[in-house]
Amino acid sequence: MTTPTRAVLRTEARLFAREPGSLFWIMLFPVALLCILGAVPSFRDPQPELGGLRTIDLYIPVTVLLSMIMAALMAMPPVLMGYRERGILRRLRTTPVSPGTVLLTQAALHAAAVLVSLVLLLAVGRLAFDIALPGSVLGYAVALLLAMAAAFSMGAVVAAVSPNVRVGTAIGMVFFFPSMFTAGVWFPVQAMGGLLRDAVVLTPLGAASEALHTAGTGSFPGAVDLVVVAVWTAGLALLAVRAFRWD
């Protein structure tokens, strides 16, 4: 890691730790949602149409993705947009720091919070609702890393093209609500059927939900799901770096 990257990462880590609001929405809100859903008695009953799984079993990948959405679309972009408004990015432009360094630093810090949320979700799910831990650890790790890369690539695009917080908030909402739907927050992807499911699994978070669910049940994620997430990630990341505005 280069010296400028270390300096930016060290400074940003201190600032990120002082944002209790962001930490709540990323680390604790998904856990609270899982507890609320788990309190619904019918969600704890096996469903024949779900292959014997319970509805609450399907919400582990959903809440993991929700944590990523909160981090990537609601927490990270306002930080960079605020820096742009205050001229901090303009000053960084005169240093060896590149757009990729700025974006990767913020993504890495917020991804660390997502990993904390993941540990809490798996622990609460297991202890409170008897949800099985991921059956394929390697598959889950691969799906998780790709899903985070896709989510933060979306957030990077929002942060890169937005001239200020006001416009960026509006652009973020355009990504936020469709992302919530395709991640399965309102209705799990695995419970969808027909053309709707076929369309949702072609989106980055829809495919990520399928990959996480497959790994959670003990199998390695399907290649098609991983390729869909990887292609979206590459395209969005390239767009974010190319479109990045220093001011």
Image (cartoon, rainbow, N blue to C red):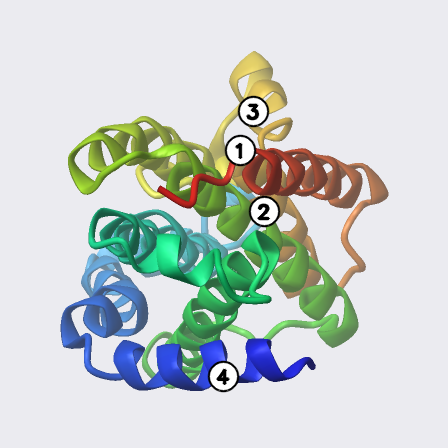
Q: Which residue is mark 1?
A: 243
Do residues under tags 1 and 2 come within 8 Å of each other at their CB atoms? no
Task: Using the image, determine if residue 75 lies above or below residue 240.
Answer: below
The foreground one among 235 and 41 is 235
Q: Earlier in the sequence, mark 4 or mark 3?
A: 4
Q: Which mark is residue 81?
A: none
Judged from the image, the secondary structure of the residue bearing numbered disc 2 is helix
Which residue lies at the image location 61% right of the left edge and 30% below the top edge?
201
The foreground one among 133 and 141 is 141
Camera-near label (4 vs 2) is: 4
Which residue lies at the image location 32% right of the left edge and 81% below the top edge?
128
User: Residue lying furthest front in this view?
Assistant: 94
Q: Earlier in the sequence, mark 3 or mark 1?
A: 3
Q: Earlier in the sequence, mark 4 or mark 1?
A: 4
Q: Which residue is mark 4?
A: 7
Q: Which mark is residue 197?
A: 3
* Mark 3 vs mark 1, CA separation in Å: 32 Å
- Tag 4: amino acid: Ala
Camera-near label (3 vs 2) is: 2
Percent x, y of residue 194: 58, 16
- Tag 1: amino acid: Ala
- Tag 2: amino acid: Ala
Q: Earlier in the sequence, mark 3 or mark 2?
A: 2
Judged from the image, the secondary structure of the residue bearing numbered disc 1 is helix
* Mark 4 vs mark 3, CA separation in Å: 44 Å
* Mark 1 vs mark 2, CA separation in Å: 17 Å
Percent x, y of residue 103: 51, 57
Q: Earlier in the sequence, mark 1 or mark 2?
A: 2
Judged from the image, the secondary structure of the residue bearing numbered disc 3 is helix
Q: Which mark is residue 150?
A: 2
